[in-house]
Image (tube, grey):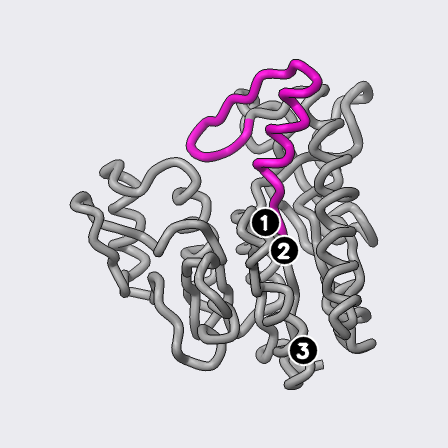
């Protein structure tokens, strides 16, 4: 199959809101013949469920610290509640979507990213065979960011690891040689110290914003996801998913946000 036409879309908490148009755009683009792979997060819902269970939430460099209790909640929320809601919404609007996690079909194999992050995986290998099969069948794969703990796993450790959704999306896009990687988020894009939107950045300039602290928190893994594929994809961008039909406009060449390009 022609992988160079695939668009990887990372959607976060902006999706599935009462006024959100992301699912409509996914269905429209699929019906126009676009090949889409959707990666979703679910951080806010995970935090809400952790709070219900009395589990504190901590972040390091924009990534959730995941202990055993947090992992159980993350798997249930990501692979269950969020994934199936998105899949159902796409199918209900006339699209064709199948929900999977990175653990299905040994899609994503990992080792521990950093001990201080707990059960958070660093992607070592992506087996894209399952994605090829789904795309050839006319489906939109909707993927929750989990992976198999496949390398250096102690015997008493869980089999699944949580993965930051933005970094996960970058790894998927790199593995399949995606044409575009689009992050839909809840901010206009990357801004400078004065809050002004930076519409275009080289990979080096984007990394400098992280190093200087101008880009922080959840923007760090988004930038890293873009930089991961900047030499592969023709377009890597971070756009405001709160805007009506932001995804469709981006694919049609009328998008805003921040585009990151190779040096």
In the rendered image, residue 57 lying in the magenta stretch gets the answer yes
Mark 3 is surrounded, within 10 Å at the Cα level, by few (under 14), some (14 to 19) or many (20 or more) other residues, namely some
Residue 30, which numbered label? 3
Is residue 195 left or right of 146 when viewed as pictured? left
- Residue farthest top in this picture: 54
Dot 2 and dot 1 residues touching (CB under 8 Å): yes
Q: Can residue 156 be seen in this view?
A: yes
Mark 2 is surrounded, within 10 Å at the Cα level, by few (under 14), some (14 to 19) or many (20 or more) other residues, namely many
Residue nearest the observer in this picture, 156 or 212: 212
Magenta extent: 39-64
- Secondary structure at badge 2 equals strand
Mark 1 is surrounded, within 10 Å at the Cα level, by few (under 14), some (14 to 19) or many (20 or more) other residues, namely many
Residue that appears at 35% across and 55% down: 189
Residue 247 position, x and y percent, is 51, 69
**Sequence-first tag of 3 and 2:** 3
Is residue 154 left or right of 243 when viewed as pictured? right
Residue that appears at 63% across and 54% down: 16
Dot 1 and dot 3 residues touching (CB under 8 Å): no
Q: Which mark lies nearer to you, 1 or 3? A: 3
Residue that appears at 63% across and 80% down: 34
Residue 261, which numbered label? none
Residue 179 position, x and y percent, is 53, 74
Residue 168, which numbered label? 1
Q: Is residue 213 above or below residue 194?
A: above
Separation (CA) of disc 3 from disc 2: 15 Å
- Secondary structure at badge 3 equals helix
């Amino acid at each position: 199959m022609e992988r160079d036409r695939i668009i990887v879309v990372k959607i976060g908490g902006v999706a599935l809101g009462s006024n959100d148009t992301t699912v409509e755009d996914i269905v429209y683009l699929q019906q126009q013949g676009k090949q889409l792979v959707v990666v979703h997060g679910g951080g806010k819902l995970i935090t809400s469920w952790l709070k219900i269970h009395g589990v504190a939430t901590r972040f390091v460099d924009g990534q959730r610290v995941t202990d055993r209790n947090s992992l159980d909640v993350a798997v249930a929320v990501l692979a269950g509640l969020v994934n199936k809601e998105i899949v159902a919404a796409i199918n209900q609007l006339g699209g064709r979507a199948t929900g999977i996690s990175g653990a299905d079909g040994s899609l994503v194999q990992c080792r521990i990213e950093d001990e201080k992050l707990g059960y958070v995986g660093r992607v070592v290998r992506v087996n894209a065979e399952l994605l090829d099969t789904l795309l050839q069948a006319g489906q939109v794969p909707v993927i929750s960011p989990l992976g198999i703990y496949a390398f250096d796993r102690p015997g008493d450790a869980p089999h699944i690891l949580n993965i930051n959704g933005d970094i996960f999306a970058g790894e998927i896009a790199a593995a399949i040689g995606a044409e575009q990687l689009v992050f839909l988020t809840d901010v206009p894009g990357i801004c400078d110290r004065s809050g002004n939107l930076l519409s275009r950045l080289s990979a080096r300039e984007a990394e400098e914003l992280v190093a200087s602290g101008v880009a922080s928190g959840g923007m760090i893994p988004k930038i890293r996801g873009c930089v991961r594929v900047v030499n592969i994809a023709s377009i890597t961008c971070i756009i405001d998913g709160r805007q009506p039909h932001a995804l469709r406009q981006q694919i049609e060449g009328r998008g805003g946000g921040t585009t990151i390009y190779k040096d």
